[in-house]
Amino acid sequence: MPQGPLAAAISRNFQKALNFVQLGQQGDLWESARHGKYYAGVYGTPTITSPATVAKAGSSFRGANQVSASLSNGLATTYTGLCLSNPVASTVNLVVKKIGGVITSAVSGQLALGLITGWAAAGITVHTTPLNTSILNSYIGAATANGSILGAASAANLDAACTLVGTPLWTEWLAANGAANSDFALYVDLDESIIIPPGGYCAIGATAGQGGFFGSFFWEELSP
């Protein structure tokens, strides 16, 4: 990274001409983004052939409930809803980017939705309703032009029901319905502010049990 007022960096354009990169007064890089902030992580690095390097480059995945699920009450460890967890034997961190949720048959008056997180040395081991077959690479179909995963699957576990371990805690509040028993939806950009290491998990929770629920996670997998 260029540092100080005399630092300079060189780039090359499509015509192979060399250009100096413009820096600000604090040595900050002046740039304009061609793509959105998630594009590089989704597209991957097609020239990489080493699995170890691929893990460092990262791969992006998505997972969601495929049918309506129930959402358990509060911090109950016998959890139902949508939980993303990282097995203890995993070699990557799960970097959560976005979370979505829909309540389609609200009950129990007004409620709030939030994130529940926790960690235990052995990680989550009871996967009552696993959804791992619903985990998709964000590069749809993981086309061969994309080298970010080299055919490897996600390291994560995704569950519609599981047994939470450690001490689950409310970590962030996301949304609330505006009136008693009203349905609502949310889609929150966490901007990679939650990292799930091996043994950890992140789940969508409610302040009261609900019947009709659909949730989704968007995350990247990166070596620590």
Image (spheres, rainbow, N blue to C red):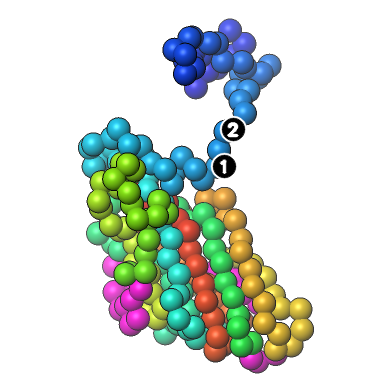
Residue at the far left: name it. Answer: 50
- Identified at 65% across, 92% down, the residue is 108
Magenta segment's dominant SS is: loop
Residue underneath mark 1: 36
The one nearer the camera, 83 or 168, is 83
The one nearer the camera, 116 or 134, is 134
Mark 1 in CB contact with mark 2 (< 8 angstroms): yes
The magenta segment is 107-131
Quarter where residue 105 is shown: bottom right
Does residue 223 show up? no
Residue at the far bottom: name it. Answer: 108
Quick one: label 1, few (<14), some, or many (20+) residues within 10 Å?
A: few
Residue at the far right: name it. Answer: 179
Residue 61: percent from left, percent from top: 40, 56
Whether residue 194 is situated above or below residue 37 in the rendered picture: below
- Identified at 42% across, 84% down, the residue is 78
Residue 124 covered by magenta stretch = yes
Q: Type of residue at label 2?
A: Ala
Residue 115: percent from left, percent from top: 55, 68
- Identified at 25% across, 46% down, the residue is 150
Quarter where residue 67 is shown: bottom left
